[in-house]
Image (cartoon, rainbow, N blue to C red):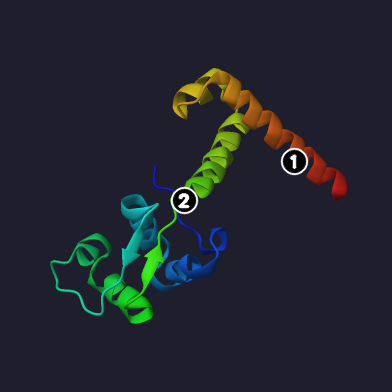
Amino acid sequence: MLLMACAENYTGIFRDVVLCIGEECAEKLIAKYGGTRLYIPATLGTGHDLCLLLGGDAAQRLIDGFKGEVLEIPRGWLTHIQQRNALMMNDRESGMPQRALAIKYRLTERTVRKIVSGINAAHQGHKRQE
């Protein structure tokens, strides 16, 4: 399951990176380099890791926008959790039992209960404000 790196989920320079190379390519950067710093060289050969990972066009856009910079690549964990929880809530609303959710998302049933009840409580509070 590939979860997309949406620009609105990031701040600072990585948000600019997502806007520059697109969400799919940004997700590839996170998957490979998340939690590390990545130097963006001024030029790339066709066999450079960034070209192989992102494709030539996206790698060139990254260079055009960030050459010579060291980028802090986020782990993307918070985004992953938020997206997983949204998918889980959809499954729950479709009638999937908590045990099946726990197996599908590789969580304990207790964790599933906490997530579902927390989301339900937040959803109820949002409805009251409307």
Mark 1: amino acid: His
Residue at 58% x, 41% y is 86
Q: Which residue is mark 1?
A: 123
x%, y% of residue 121?
76, 35
Residue at 40% x, 59% y is 73
Q: How many marks?
A: 2
Q: Could you tell whether 38 is left or right of 56 in the image? A: right
Q: Is residue 33 above or below residue 104?
A: below
Q: Is residue 41 above or below residue 4?
A: below
Nearer the observer, 127 or 74 = 74
Quadrant position of the N terminus in the picture: top left
Residue at 24% x, 60% y is 53
Q: Is residue 1 above or below residue 17?
A: above
Which class describes the residues within 10 Å of circle 2: few (<14), some (14-19), or many (20+)?
Answer: some
Mark 2: amino acid: Gly
x%, y% of residue 82?
56, 44
Q: Is residue 97 visible?
A: no
| Picture quadrant where residue 63 is located | bottom left
| Spatial separation of the CA atoms under disc 2 and disc 1 | 24 Å
Nearer the observer, 29 or 67 = 67
Q: Which residue is mark 2?
A: 76
| Picture quadrant where residue 119 is located | top right
